[in-house]
């Protein structure tokens, strides 16, 4: 199962490279003089399942399969773009902005993990 | 010579008079802070240093509480995540803080605004924080009001005008992600405040700052703060951190000790199982996390401690700031609740365990805790993968962070217990340390009902030393606000759905209730203004524990606003 996620993540990263201009522009506009650039993804840190359990599972219960502090994510009808933007920019008072914490590749890996979830 | 002696004697009398009258406020402050009951004022977070959350006022009492009605209200700006703070009251003025560390000074009798203060925060940083932007309280002393900020500052405001006296950066919150949400504690000339942080790679420092000058005097690392402690984090794992002292503790003037509770280590859940002393993300006891520590307030030096849960692998902090100081016979004791659902009773002179008792029914992270030594019996150390049965309590704890109350009149300790468990799967994690740290949890989990019934809460009235129960009131959902006892033979409980209840402190019989319209997760106080007793209750939902109630209970929490609040003040009908 995890291999599948990594494959999906890799495909998604390739897709991301094709649209880097839009994302790079958003990244700059979300930051400020004091913000640091997100780190580059490496092959060892795109395990979406692991990243989810490290950070995201605090609010999205049962690995994203059930609502908790945050909503259920499995079978979400939200678009990929919406989920990526929500991870990067957060929601005031509800979800932190992870745009300067996770690399674009890591965010895509988390998205791939979410898309691979069964109920 | 005779004249000289008479002159000296006169000077001595004059000096004494000056000493007695020249600083009456200081003398009164010390007496009020050391008393068992908060009287006309509510001068510190826990009522007094004894942490009883008990008002000695009795104008409002069991006989007339049915006539309690709203006197005035105040609405804070930008109440993101509701209101979570405990107000203070001094000389008829009520002070309280809201989200983003905004502070309000109000006439205690009418609610008229005297001044307000809104610090400019690093909003970009705030947007990246999980445990933010709420504030849980303030402190008053040296003519100042003190408030911490989520971007790592401690600010002093002139009590009369609200103008900043000093603004001190204590934490590099951009690096460690967290700042301050808990109330400071004023002890003599020092303002003491603990950082947030159980799930981040900080070292949970507690700071001592000179209240007059704003100079940092000391910093104590709750993670590996001594050589002894450093040895309890193998493989340099102290860098994964945790241990924030995120709620204010209390002060024992007899031993000149500040008691403080510390948070869990990171990650919360450890995949090493029973081999935790040698393997996993943080091998060893992980001192001084999930501990109660006694610090010298003048130097910040550790005097003594007790680690309630060595190598906490369940996120059951000791950060609850409540240290109830009571005497039994010739014994001087302090009672401290732990998030795991046990209540510890210590000797106040050395933190030696005198007793440990259970407040909640559903506990399986240990089989028991030895009431004579505090040793954990039958630890349930989780291994990688799905746990074979739910862990009890759940991550929200058997006991949450708000405070109970003790009435010296009834001799009873009133405390909320939570009955909820969770399914979990432990995952191996890699901490994210750069460029900005984020939560380090180490598991996927889902809250579920406990084995003995529905997920629920209860208010217990118990002997604080033996734990023997006198009465109990049950709730569909655990109330998350602090509670208050009064000399009027009353116990007030602001609940999760928005209703405030007043009970007979002896029997638990409900005598009065009113719906404030939104859930409570803040601190209730009482005070006197213009010869009249008031009860102030901040309402406004949105704590991280309360967020779990949507999945557990559905409505009314699904529809309850998390970004509004009101301070609602009650008095007797004329």
Image (tube, grey):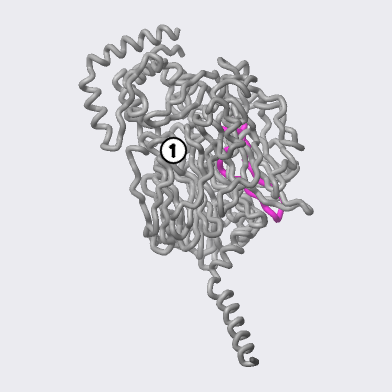
Q: Residue at x 24, y 32 (%)?
A: A29
Q: Is residue A113 above or below residue B233?
A: above
- Residue B93 appears at what percent x and percent y? 47, 62
On the picture, is B470 further left or further right than A11?
Answer: right
Residue B334, x across and y down, in percent:
68, 47
Would you say residue B244 sits in the magenta stretch? no
| Quadrant holding the N terminus of chain B | bottom right
Q: Position of residue B72 (x, y in %)?
A: 45, 57
Quarter of image, res B560: top left
Between B217 and B67, which is closer to the camera in this rendering? Answer: B217
Q: Which residues are magenta?
A: B396-420
Q: Looking at the image, is B398 positioned above or below residue B71?
A: above
- Residue occupying the point 26% across, 37% down: A33
Q: Vertically, is B10 above or below B523?
A: below
Extreme right residue here? B329
Q: Residue at x 40, y 10 (%)?
A: A5
- Local SS, label 1: loop
Disc tally is 1
Depth order, front residue of A37/B107:
A37
Examine the rendering and report whether any part of residue B280 can be seen: yes
- Asked if residue B484 shows in the view, the reply is no
Q: Position of B138 compared to B264: left or right?
A: left
Name the spot of residue B4 as percent of width and height, x first: 61, 89
Q: Which residue is mark 1?
A: B178
């Amino acid at each position: 199962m995890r291999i599948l996620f990594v494959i999906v993540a890799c495909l998604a990263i390739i897709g991301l490279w094709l649209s880097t201009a839009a994302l790079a522009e958003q990244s700059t506009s979300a930051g400020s003089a004091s913000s640091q650039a997100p780190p580059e993804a490496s092959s060892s840190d795109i395990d979406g399942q692991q990243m989810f359990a490290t950070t995201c599972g605090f609010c999205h219960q049962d690995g994203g399969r059930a609502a908790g502090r945050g909503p259920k994510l499995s079978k979400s009808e939200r678009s990929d773009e919406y989920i990526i933007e929500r991870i990067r920019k957060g929601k005031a008072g509800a979800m932190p902005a992870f745009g300067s914490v996770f690399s674009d590749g890591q965010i895509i890996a988390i998205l791939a993990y979410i898309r691979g979830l069964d109920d | 010579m005779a004249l000289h002696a008479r002159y000296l004697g006169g000077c001595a009398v004059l000096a004494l008079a000056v000493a007695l009258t020249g600083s009456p406020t200081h003398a009164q402050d010390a007496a009020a802070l050391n008393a068992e009951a908060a009287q006309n004022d509510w001068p510190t977070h826990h009522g007094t240093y004894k942490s009883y959350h008990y008002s000695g006022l009795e104008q409002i009492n069991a006989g007339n509480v049915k006539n309690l009605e709203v006197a005035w209200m105040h609405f804070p700006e930008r109440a993101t995540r509701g209101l979570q703070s405990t107000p203070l009251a001094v000389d008829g003025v009520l002070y309280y803080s809201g989200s983003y560390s905004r502070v309000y000074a109000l006439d205690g009798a009418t609610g008229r605004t005297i001044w307000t203060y809104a610090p400019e925060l690093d909003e970009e940083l705030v947007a990246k924080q999980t445990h933010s932007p709420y504030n849980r309280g303030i402190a008053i002393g040296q003519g100042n009001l003190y408030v911490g900020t989520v971007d790592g500052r401690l600010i002093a405001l002139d009590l009369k005008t609200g103008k900043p006296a000093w603004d001190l950066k204590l934490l590099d919150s951009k690096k460690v992600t967290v700042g301050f949400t808990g109330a400071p504690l004023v002890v003599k000339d020092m303002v003491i405040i603990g950082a947030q942080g159980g799930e981040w790679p900080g070292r949970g420092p507690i700071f001592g700052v000179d209240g007059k000058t704003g100079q940092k005097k000391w910093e104590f690392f709750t993670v590996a703060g001594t050589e002894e402690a450093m040895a309890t984090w193998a493989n340099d794992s102290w860098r994964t951190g945790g241990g924030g002292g995120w709620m204010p503790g209390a002060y024992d003037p007899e031993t000149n000790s500040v008691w403080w509770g510390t948070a869990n280590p990171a990650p919360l859940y450890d995949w090493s199982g029973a081999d935790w002393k040698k393997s996993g993300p943080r091998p060893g006891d992980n001192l001084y996390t999930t501990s109660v520590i006694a610090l010298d307030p003048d130097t910040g030096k550790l005097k003594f401690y007790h680690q309630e849960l060595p190598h906490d692998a369940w996120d059951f902090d000791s950060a609850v700031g409540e240290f109830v100081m009571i005497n039994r016979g010739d014994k001087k004791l302090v009672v401290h609740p732990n998030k795991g659902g046990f209540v510890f009773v210590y000797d106040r002179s050395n933190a030696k365990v005198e007793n440990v008792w259970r407040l909640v029914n559903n506990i399986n992270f240990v089989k028991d805790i030895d009431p004579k030594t505090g040793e954990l019996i039958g630890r349930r150390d989780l291994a990688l993968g799905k746990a074979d049965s739910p862990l009890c309590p759940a991550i929200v704890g058997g006991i949450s962070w708000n405070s109970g109350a003790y009435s010296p009149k009834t001799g009873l300790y009133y405390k909320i217990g939570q009955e909820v468990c969770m399914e979990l799967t432990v995952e191996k994690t890699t901490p994210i340390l750069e460029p900005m740290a984020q939560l380090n949890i180490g598991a996927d989990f889902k809250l579920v009902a406990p084995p003995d019934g529905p997920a629920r809460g209860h208010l217990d009235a118990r002997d604080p030393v033996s734990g023997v129960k006198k009465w109990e009131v049950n709730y569909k959902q655990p109330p998350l606000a602090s509670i208050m006892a009064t000399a009027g033979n009353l116990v007030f409980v602001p609940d999760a759905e928005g209703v405030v209840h007043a009970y007979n402190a002896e029997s638990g019989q409900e005598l009065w209730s009113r719906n404030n319209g939104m859930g409570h997760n803040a601190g209730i106080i009482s005070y006197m203004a213009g010869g009249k007793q008031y009860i102030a209750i901040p309402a406004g939902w949105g704590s991280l524990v309360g967020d779990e109630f949507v999945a557990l209970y559905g409505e009314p929490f699904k529809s309850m606003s998390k970004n509004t609040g009101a301070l609602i003040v009650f008095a007797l009908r004329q």
